[in-house]
């Protein structure tokens, strides 16, 4: 499995430093989310602060920017990073789109399919000066008289799709260069729920499994005291357990109404360094790539820094 990392920083400078340390430890990709920062701005910062690791968004919100803006940002980020950029797209939930971003909500899988098609067309043909035209119910495109007058590093940028439910997961298998799991994704969920949906998408498109990078996200909390490690990770599980959208996910694991620490035992990599290495091995043969992130929910900066330092040390031990 490829080992990748989602760095944390209280400032952009600290974020860049953490990404550089993870890259030096052996992380093949450094990923940035979109919540408290713009994913594309953070990705630009990491592109300038790293040399070898690929720079990925996990994720950029797909519907809060136009496909044109997303494509242009992807091209700029690919240029800035020297061809190291990975565009990870996710839909977000209805409330986030409508209430936070004033974006109309539509069935997410059909809309994401059209959005990806538009982004890929713009990336591939914007420098040619040809009409960029696509019909569609959700993301039609009608660009004429436009030519992007800058050199491109590559003819295409990899597009990874995030998904938890069956529709978006199948779509990732059908059209994505990769799939990114939810922040909580146990080996059992990956094996029994996600991989079958990805295979359905691959089969529908006549694609080979080797053409899809399966990225599992894993919150990782390391401490010499296993109870302390679980307590930090439990902040993450308790947050998601409070969201009704994820009720079926917790029920699948038999965790409905369970204590947050019990959830952390199943849904995160929490414990001593040796215990975490053993838990990490549970994804072997299922995932192609693991995206490790430190726990951050409800924690003060000094605790996140300590958790991040231990995690980057672990990456140096397991990435080879």
Image (cartoon, rainbow, N blue to C red):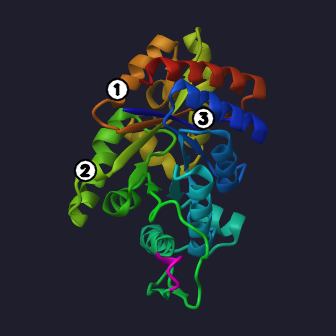
Q: Is residue 93 magenta?
A: no
**Quadrant in which the C terminus appears:** top left
Residue on which the image places disc 2: 209
In the rendered view, tell whether residue 38 sits above or below residue 265: below
Circle nearer the N terminus (3, 2): 2
Circles 3 and 2 in contact, beta carbons < 8 Å: no
Q: Position of residue 264 (x, y in %)?
A: 52, 27
Q: Residues within 10 Å of mark 3 (few under 14, many from 20)?
A: many
Looking at the rendering, the stretch of residues picked out in magenta corresponds to 125-129
- Magenta part, dominant SS: loop
Which label sits on residue 236? 3
Circle nearer the N terminus (2, 1): 2
Q: 80 and 95: which one is in front? A: 80
Q: Disc 3 vs disc 2: which is toward the camera?
A: 2
Circles 2 and 1 in contact, beta carbons < 8 Å: no
Tell me which residue sits at (31%, 62%) in the image: 174
């Amino acid at each position: 499995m490829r080992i990748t990392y989602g760095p944390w920083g209280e400032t952009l400078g600290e974020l860049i430093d953490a990404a550089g340390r993870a890259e030096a430890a052996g992380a093949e990709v450094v990923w940035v989310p979109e919540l408290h920062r713009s994913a594309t701005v953070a990705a630009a910062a990491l592109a300038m602060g790293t040399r070898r690791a690929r720079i990925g968004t996990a994720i950029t919100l797909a519907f809060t920017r136009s496909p044109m803006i997303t494509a242009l940002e992807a091209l700029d980020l690919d240029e800035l990073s020297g061809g190291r950029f990975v565009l990870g797209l996710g839909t977000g939930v209805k409330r986030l789109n409508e209430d936070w971003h004033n974006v109309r909500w539509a069935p997410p899988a059909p809309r994401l399919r059209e959005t990806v098609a538009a982004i890929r067309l713009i990336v591939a043909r914007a420098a040619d000066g040809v009409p960029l035209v696509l019909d569609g119910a959700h993301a039609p495109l009608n660009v004429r008289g436009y030519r992007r007058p800058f050199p491109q590093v590559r003819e295409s940028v990899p597009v990874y799709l995030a998904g938890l439910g069956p529709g978006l997961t199948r779509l990732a298998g059908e059209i994505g260069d990769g799939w990114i799991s939810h922040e909580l994704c146990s080996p059992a969920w990956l094996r029994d729920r996600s991989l079958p949906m990805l295979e359905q998408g691959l089969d529908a498109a006549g694609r080979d499994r080797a053409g899809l990078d399966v990225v599992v996200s894993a919150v990782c909390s390391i401490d010499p005291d296993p109870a302390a490690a679980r307590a930090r990770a439990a902040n993450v599980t308790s947050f998601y357990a409070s969201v009704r959208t994820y009720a079926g996910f917790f029920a699948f694991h038999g965790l409905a109404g369970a204590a947050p620490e019990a959830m952390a035992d199943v849904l995160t990599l929490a414990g001593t360094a040796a215990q975490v290495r053993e838990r990490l091995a549970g994804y072997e043969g299922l995932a192609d790539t693991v995206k490790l992130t430190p726990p951050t929910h409800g924690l003060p900066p000094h605790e996140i820094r300590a958790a991040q330092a231990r995690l980057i040390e672990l990456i140096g031990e397991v990435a080879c």
